[in-house]
Image (cartoon, rainbow, N blue to C red):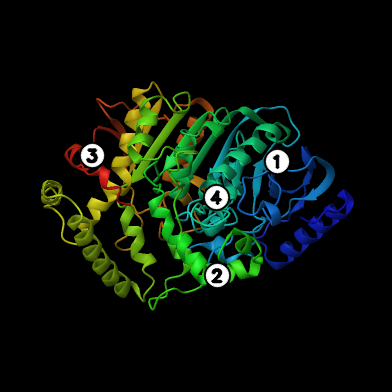
Amino acid sequence: MKRKSLIAAAILILCLGLLAGCGSQEKEKAEAADGVKCQNGNMIGTVNEGVSSYKGIPYAKAPTGDLRWKAPQDPDDSDEDVDAFDYGYSAIQTEWFSEAASKREQSEDCLTLNVWTASPNSDEKKPVMVFFHGGAYGWGGSGDPLYDGQSFVKAHDDVILVTANYRIGIMGFIDFSSVEGGSDYGDAPNLGLLDHVQALKWVKENIAQFGGDPENVTIFGESAGGGTTSLMLAMDEAKGLFKRCISESGSAALTYSKEDCQELTKTILEVSGAKNMKELAALSEEELKKINAAEIDDEGTTVNDLTNMPQRDGKVLPESLEELYAAYEKGAGKDVDLMIGTNKNEWNYWIGEMAVGDEEENYEAFQGWMAERFAGDKEAMSKKDRKTVDEFISLQSDKEEPWKTVEFYNDIAFRVPACIEAANHTKAGGKTYMYYWTYPSAIERYGACHAVELSYVFNNLQDTSFTGENPNKELAAKVQEAWVNFAKTGDPSIEGADWPQYNGDTRQTMIIGEEWKVEKDPLSKQRELIETLIKYDIK
């Protein structure tokens, strides 16, 4: 992170603003924002239309050198000025067309966060919302324009928004226990989660300087970020660092066993030629990037494609999925208000991710993938459970293939695990709200797909990657109001939509669609069937 004097930084930002203004009347002039004194420096940002942004703030020491594959460390105290003009480096990952952050410059030195506030250096104590991105634990970053906080805070200047990077892929979720010297890297399977904790510690210690209330922090995330935020409730290391949690299309189910994590370890050793941790630690950053991008079969599969999910290691997380679910039932995170939900057509997202050709070619590839995967997953089940799958499919009489099969994956990978988590959290005495997003994308066949809500939540409707053209502005306003109300008060109810708490008996769920309405236990028969199949840990 380069450092300059306050005067030099201000001049630089003013120049950047003038250049931006010359390019187009639509571009807003950026001005220098007031410096904000933090534990690790005086952060110099920019201000635009009343919103001050501070980007690329380091919340930990760079995890490089002796700190590679080690738990994050507190940044050094400092009173120097720190440029906070632009997002920090993205975490190491392969470039992928739908992950904008993957196209930014990458580095091991990626532990940074970003703050948007309308009241820097005030004592207003506004609610704080901290977002953790998705990306299958191997892609993504806070530099994705979809997560830019300018429009959100401009519309809701009574909250502070923070977005954070964390280590992913081979740098954030890898098990070295089978490697010579691996005992010195016992945190490696869950470094990405520990980075979350470190980011929240930084927020706790410094957010008051930005006008935020360190005692009223809401974490939220989508997909992998929905999984990590759910897991924060079960982690002792995260206790006391946040008050509320919003998990979008993610749950504690998005985890791996220790056995699941071994393929990546074996592959990185084979590709790198390293025989022990000393040799792995000696690799340069550029060598690691090449290893991560190396193709390992004729189909173009890369090392990055084998990325692990957080490991149920018996240290940071319980060893089995059953124990993890039970942790919520026994009261893990029961003092945290939880809002959790999924989208009606989560799995449709992967039509576009096929990336084999045009729209029809992607759809054909998707159909083939669904049929092959479904046959394999079903074959691995007992005879009794295969009959349960058949009964589930018979409930989809209004659908043609592949949509019958797709609904199976919507439920077993996303909706039902979220229902279990919500019910267990409630049973332990936690305050819980559930939603089911049904408002569709305008993109053909996408429906209410995975990630479709993100543009609405962040008020970045210009990003139509998942929504399709002409997103619903009224819906966006209502969604943001509900999310913000939850962050402020622990209750997401808005005018015209009284949102009741969820429990294991009535299972009252807010349906977010053309209309907002509450349903008791939607798709109840499907839920009951899938609950008997959760043991197969399909995701």
Mark 3 or mark 1, which is nearer to you?
1
User: Which type of secondary structure does the marked residue at label 2 adopt?
Assistant: helix
Name the amino acid, label 2: Ser
Name the amino acid, label 1: Asp
Q: Which residue in the structure is indicated by mark 1?
A: 74
* Vertical position of residue 253 compared to residue 289: above or below: above
| Rendered-image quadrant of the N terminus | bottom right
Lower position in the chain sequence, tag 1 or tag 4: 1
* Vertical position of residue 167 compared to residue 204: above or below: below
Name the amino acid, label 4: Ala
Spatial separation of the CA atoms under disc 2 and disc 1: 31 Å
Q: Residues within 10 Å of mark 4 (few under 14, many from 20)?
A: many
* Vertical position of residue 221 compared to residue 281: above or below: above
User: Going by the image, does 314 lie left or right of 205?
Assistant: left
Q: Which residue in the structure is indicated by mark 2?
A: 272
Q: Quadrant of residue 107?
A: bottom right
Lower position in the chain sequence, tag 3 or tag 2: 2
**x%, y% of residue 265?**
48, 60
Lower position in the chain sequence, tag 3 or tag 4: 4
Residue displayed at 65% across by 47% down = 114
Query: Residue lying furthest bottom in this view?
Result: 298
Lower position in the chain sequence, tag 2 or tag 1: 1
Lower position in the chain sequence, tag 3 or tag 1: 1
- Marking on residue 531: 3
**x%, y% of residue 188?**
55, 50
Q: Quadrant of residue 359?
A: bottom left
Viewer-side residue, 400 vs 20: 400
Q: Which residue in the structure is indicated by mark 4?
A: 188
- Marking on residue 469: none
Viewer-side residue, 424 vs 84: 424
